[in-house]
Image (tube, helix red, strand yellow):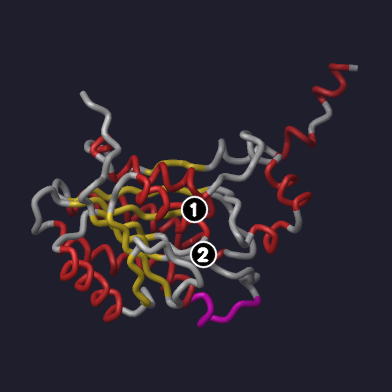
Amino acid sequence: MTLNLDLTGSVVLVTGGVRGVGRGITRAFRAAGATVVTCARRAPEEQPPDVEFHSCDVRDPEQAKGLIDTVRERHGRLDVLVNNAGGAPYALAAEASPKFHGKIVELNLLAPLQLAQYAAAVMREQDGGGSILMIASVSGTRPSPGTAAYGAAKAGVDSLAGSLAVEWAPKVRVNAIDVGLVRTEQSRLHYGGEDGIAAVGRTVPLGRLADPDEVGNCAVFLASPLASYVTGARLLVHGGGEVPAFLAASTVNQKESE
């Protein structure tokens, strides 16, 4: 069998693909030879000339459908949808308003579902079908204090990927990538300066935060022929997760070494 990560000729849509993890995903698909389309609510200050950008609020069903229709009209097909757009500001659950919680769930769960519906309708009609990737988070599988609604929505994304994989097989493969801590433009806001980023990195078994391109490489794999028998899966991209806090708190090993 030939190992093939060449996606030349494939058309890929990466939502929120202009910054952070999304930009790493965009770079990875470009490197694999794909035609990449991105979207965000606002145009980025800088954009590679070979990446097509559309302004779109993915929470709006009409704009979302219009985006999918535009991609199909311009390129004749849609092979991969990467549902990456999402996020949430820090807010304690007891203090956040119902409207705030609703907007977070809308962006991180309902918007990916709507886009997946529109994309799958295109993919199921074309030769070769297609692949849908849900960018989920470790926040969906562990406590997420300060971003409770976000964590709950990401847990829903994991469940959604499994259900859609069954409903839309065999033409459309649907998988989730559960992303851990990633070093992006916003890392300083979340963790502080270099010392804070390094300290947070030490809580990860691999000893550092991920690079966005590393998430992108995993997305390319799942969208490629190498993953042709993978659907309904959750790929953990979290550097081993988190070192259990009890290991640092325990005094047993220290006593034994004295």
Q: Look at the picture and state if 156 lies above or below 57.
A: above
Question: Residue 176, percent across and down?
Answer: 37, 49
Magenta highlight range: 95-102
Which residue carries the number 2 mark? 150
Q: Which residue is drawn at 79% across and 36% down?
A: 249
As drawn, the label of residue 53 is none
Q: Where is residue 63 in the image (x, y as percent from the top left)?
A: 30, 79
**Residue sitting nearer the eye, 97 or 85:** 85
Instruction: State yes or no: discs 1 and 2 in contact (Cβ < 8 Å).
Output: yes
- Tag 2's secondary structure? helix
User: What's the residue type where badge 1 is placed?
Assistant: Ser
In the image, what residue occupies the spot 36% across and 73% down? 58
Which callout, 1 or 2, points at the residue further toward the start of the chain? Answer: 1
Say what amino acid the circle numbered 2 marks: Tyr
Quarter residue 245 falls in: top right
Is residue 255 highlighted in magenta? Answer: no
- Residue at image location 80% in from the left, 22% down from the top: 253
* Image location (x, y in percent) of residue 118: 21, 68
Q: Label 1: which residue?
A: 137
Q: 89 and 44: which one is in front?
A: 44
C-alpha span from label 1 to label 2: 9 Å
